Amino acid sequence: MAHFLIRPELWHKIDLVRNRDVSAPGGWRYEAHLSVLADGYVSPATTIRRTQAAALDRVGGVDGNVSNLAVVSLPATGDRAHGKVLSSRITLTSDEQATLARQSKQTRDRNKALDRSRRASNPVHYRPSRPQQQRDERRAAKGLKPRRTTVPAGARTLNATGKPRQAHRRDELSNTYLRLRGRQTMAAACAAEASQHRARRLAAGLVAAHGARLTIEDCDIRSWFRRWGRACQATTPGRLIAALAAECAAVNGGRLLRASTFATALSQHCLCGRRAPKPLNQRTHHCDPDEGGCGLRGDRDLVAAALAAYTTLTDPDAPSTARLDILQARNAQIVFHQGLQEALTESTVDVSPPHSRGRSTTAAHPAPAHTQHRLPVPGPQTAASARRTAGTWITATPDETRTALLRPKAHAGTTRPHPDPSRTPLRDSS
Ligand SMILES: [Zn+2]
């Protein structure tokens, strides 16, 4: 905060933002957001990390898919004296999978409770379910009085045109429903924030290890979501790639280049230049010497990532101009022979963010000491940020006022902005 406000020439604005918080008085949590017309705050630790990344003379490739992200980098000079081949593979740890499963169960339970609450508050707009109808018929056949159904479990009642007789927005909603829906909104926002935070930390770790000159296949992630939506929702590949691109761009001279899959077909080639076609379910790469191959054996994604490092683009902004530089790839294969084979078999640099809660998976399955070392991923910066909550007010904050047209004494001109924007005065007291 002080970082920006000590510069009086800097244009700034402070917004009051409200977020759903069912536990706060009035159901909302209010925050003051400071916007400035300048670059955002960068902590000293981040500056040091990015300077070190800019000094790394490495080229790398990234292979992103539904379940993991593979990164392989080599010294840009192609000389073994200037560094080793490094590889990292980002997958969901068992802790993260357990957390996602728990959140998903909570969401399902809340949705079920919300549906039940809506039905209980609007029983006339739902039909009884088949078992409820059968029960009524059985009771009628025995001459018993029909039992009153408090929560009809069937479909919504429809009108002659096949549309719900009453729009959902006109339904009666109980206080329990509103509280529960608030919790659901909060949980979704929380999960999105956590996923974004994970992506940023992973990107920071990857760029710190592999440098900021990376190339990735230009994939349409929307098509992945159409086919493997649930898996993508858990691993969030798009968010990871976007965070990686942002981190690369933040490093001086760094950039995440995109190479067209059509022009390169990285997963269907070997480093020796031979075409090695394989179906999607075959997760290993083997260039069979019996068929005239070089004998390279490795993880499919890591091999594709290594190949991406040897992609050249005539125009960095046009993915279709990408071509595979087979000569350089073959040269690297000869120079880094043993190290390359090891790096393409398993991840050699672990950049997974340390988990704050629960058991660490690294401790449960320790990697061999000679192949794996953990990079220092900077911890949360506690000293630099402002306090999030300044205090609690004893009375609830009133709800927002109604829109101008619904207010009983709305005067034209006083509540609506002037139609001509050039005549709207800008008040600037600074
Ligand atoms: Zn080969």
Image: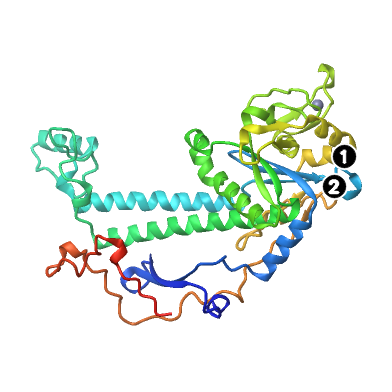
113 vs 106, left or right, is left
Q: Earlier in the sequence, mark 2 or mark 1?
A: 2
Q: Position of residue 423 (x, y in %)?
A: 28, 66
Please, what is the three-letter code of the amino acid marked with disc 2? Lys
The residue sitting at the top extreme is 291
| Numbered tag placed on residue 336 in the rendering | 1
Q: Name the residue: 85% across, 37% down.
A: 332
Name the colouring of the figure.
rainbow
Q: Nearer the viewer, residue 383 or 27?
A: 383
Where's the N terminus, which quadrant?
Answer: bottom right
Q: Nearer the viewer, residue 113 or 371?
A: 371
Circle count = 2
Q: In what element is the residue under mark 1?
A: loop
Q: Is residue 384 above or below residue 38?
A: below
Please, what is the three-letter code of the amino acid marked with disc 1? Phe
Q: Position of residue 186 (x, y in %)?
A: 41, 60
Q: Name the residue: 26% across, 69% down.
A: 400
Q: Name the residue: 74% across, 52% down.
A: 211
Cβ atoms under marks 2 and 1 closer than 8 Å = yes
Q: Position of residue 389 (x, y in %)?
A: 46, 76
Q: Nearer the viewer, residue 424 or 40?
A: 424
399 vs 405, left or right, is right
| Numbered tag placed on residue 84 in the rendering | 2
Residue 283 in sight from this viewpoint: no
